[in-house]
Amino acid sequence: GQLFIVALYTNKGEEYIQNVRNLVQNEQLGGLILMQDDAEREINLLNEFQKTTKVPMMIGMDAEWGLFQRIPSAHKFPWAMTLGAIQDKKLIYEMAAKIAQDSKRMGINWDFAPVVDVNTNPNNPIIGNRSFGSEVDNVVKSATAYSNGLQDQNILAAIKHFPGHGDTSTDSHLDLPVVSHNLERLNAIELAPFKALMDKNVGGVMIAHLYVPALESEKEIPASLSKKIITEILKEKYGYKGLIITDALNMGAVAKRYKPGEVDALAFKAGNDIMLFSDGVKEGKRLIQKAIDDKEISQNRVEESVKKILLTKYFLGLN
């Protein structure tokens, strides 16, 4: 159960909330991602859920430009493109620290930010002004300031969307984008910010639903489900030790191709520690256990991820 994060909306009715409540109580979820839209209701539910769960949950949110990204009544900070134009990166650090303080008031301890995609495609339908810009060095400096601003306030950061969503013409919320560059270009642009920031103690990396033929030879396998990309490159080649989390598993790039639960198990087998926005917790747990029983993955693999998750919670003060 610690391997799964489920969405919590307050605008989908009481039956939806009761379903989340049941998952929290019965499946020992690792965490929740807060979505739209009533902050007070979310806070009250989080307080209730955290009291009833045996292991405190990690609470995440996409708060790239602050809580406003999900909570309309919250303060809106600038988008990353504006921040990338700022020469004094200390201002980005201070802004991220303020977002961290706002997050704490909501009970959030993981901001799924910053975006470190290098936005080289002006027609990109989903990254665009969520990126710090089109120059690697500026993206790295801006994202480092942002990540430090969060983590110095004890809010976990997550650099995204590995291995690089900046040069795509398809929105992965809708379908599977293809990044067709060769390895030399990927190393110089798309992968470069991730390599740089992994050495700066950023606690999380989010994996994109992208097909990158230069990194994954099997046709139309998204990075988020690719053992070659996550285990062999991110973990083994780059030596990344932090938490590895999928992008939302309800997004069209994977949801159109795989069933709930099935996609969770595939994501875990590929090397992710946490399956975000799971719509199939029970089935995912069953299929992961089946993979252990069939010796597709080891029991140690599960224990390693759970240990990372629990240690992260400990360091965030969720004892």
Image: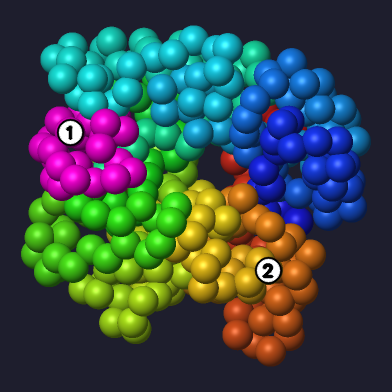
Q: Is residue 196 toward the left or the right of residue 274 in the image? A: left
Residue 24 in magenta? no
Closer-to-camera residue (160/305): 160
Q: Is residue 86 toward the left or the right of residue 270 in the image? A: left
Image point (38%, 64%), residue name: 176
Q: Position of residue 175 (x, y in %)?
A: 40, 62
Closer-to-camera residue (286/56): 286
Q: Identify the secondary structure beneath mark 1.
A: loop
Look at mark 1 in the image and give the residue it sits on: 133
Disc 2 residue crowd, few under 14, some 14–19, many 20+, Cα 10 Å: many
Q: Is residue 183 depicted above or below 96 in this figure?
A: below
Look at mark 2 in the image and give the residue it sits on: 261
**What amino acid is at disc 2?**
Gly
Which one is earlier in the sequence, the residue at label 2 or at label 1? 1
Q: How many marks?
A: 2
**What amino acid is at disc 1?**
Gly
Image point (16%, 20%), residue name: 85
Q: Position of residue 47 (x, y in %)?
A: 82, 24
Bounds of the magenta segment:
118-144
